[in-house]
Image (cartoon, rainbow, N blue to C red):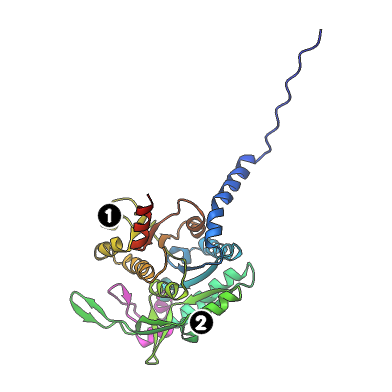
Amino acid sequence: MTAPAQPAPATPVPPGRDDALAKAATLIEALPWLSRFHGQTVVLKYGGHAMADHGLRHAFAQDVVFLRHAGLRPVVVHGGGPQISAHLDRLGVPSTFKAGLRVTSPEAMDVVRMVLTGQVNRDLVGLVNRHGPFAVGMSGEDANLFTARRRAAVVDGEPVDLGLVGEIDAVDPGAVLALLRDGRVPVVSSVARGADGEVYNVNADTAAAALAVALGAVKLVVLTDVEGLYADWADGAAQGGVISRLTATGLEQLLPGLSAGMIPKMEACLRAVRGGVPQARVLDGRLPHSVLLEIFTDSGIGTMVVPDEAAGAEAAGD
């Protein structure tokens, strides 16, 4: 009598297989986005908690290097409000804000210039260059990248003097384009020279949007300290969920009711898409590697703003 065949032993599951499969799935999910954005310029506005936290600073630098190795052309624009305030406090120079902007005296402007270009910019360039000779720091003054004029503001119907706070009039992206052609990562501080010879403190969100338009960027990404634009925000707390997608016109209608902190960020997104950038997104910089999650995953994160015609084209294709 023939003995019954013994069942083949089960194939052992390699340890860590599930983790490996999850990583492979993430890489495959990124494939269409890698293809879509290869060779394209992405402008990243760096600020908020991501700039103040040690771990998040390193994670952001890794994200920038990943983008560069993945074939994208990242450009970083940064401010440095907390660092400026801390330095002014040490020097005993008072910080005053009107209309959500720092009133910048000539004395304060010297500090702004020193901190943005001499400290924050160098720190970020150093973090990126730990991974290779990629980042090159520059100011908006360099090669007349940004030309600005004195910015006017109105508070309660009355004009107020903001001092040396500038509004960007023109962008000459030649120096940035040269760096990108050389495979470098430009890191730009938001200081600008005026046609009048003055040096101006420029809002970094505004500077990033203007540069994204001038470079013909495929995307503007603005890091902030909230998950995105909330459907309802009152008394300093979210009353509704995050709006995942807005048209330029939809955002324009919401702007007057937004909190003071979100207005310059959403105005930057609006300026970018009105200027020809296909999409702009505000996202939570407190989340490690948020830039990679936004660019290389199907769901994305934060709030995306698109031109009106993009929404119309999608509706026509349904």
At label 1, counting other C-alpha atoms closer than 10 Å, the crowd grade (few under 14, some 14-19, many 20 or more) is some
Report the quarter where the N terminus lies: top right
| Residue placed under numbered mark 2 in the picture | 174
Location of residue 65 (image quadrant)? bottom right
Amino acid at dot 2: Gly
For the record, the magenta segment spans 85-111
**Is 150 in front, or is 220?**
220
- In three-dimensional space, the C-alpha distance between marks 2 and 1, rounded to whole angstroms, equals 41 Å
Q: Which mark is in front, 2 or 1? A: 2
Q: Secondary structure at mark 1?
A: loop
Amino acid identity at mark 1: Asp
Residue 131 relative to residue 124: left or right: right
**Residue depicted at x 45% and y 58%:** 286
Q: Is residue 183 magenta?
A: no
Which of the two discs, 2 and 1, labels the residue nearer the N terminus? 2
Q: Which residue is mark 1?
A: 232
Q: Where is 3 relative to 129, above or below?
A: above
**Residue 61 relative to residue 261: left or right:** right
Q: Residue furthest left?
A: 157
**Neighbour class for label 2 at 10 Å: few (<14), some, many (≥20)?**
some
Residue 244 lies left or right of residue 184; in this view the side is left
Residue at horizontal 46 percent and vertical 82 percent from the top: 172
Query: Is the residue 287 above or below the residue 162 in the image?
Result: above
> Can residue 134 be seen by looking at this rendering?
yes
The answer to whether residue 118 shows anywhere in this view is no
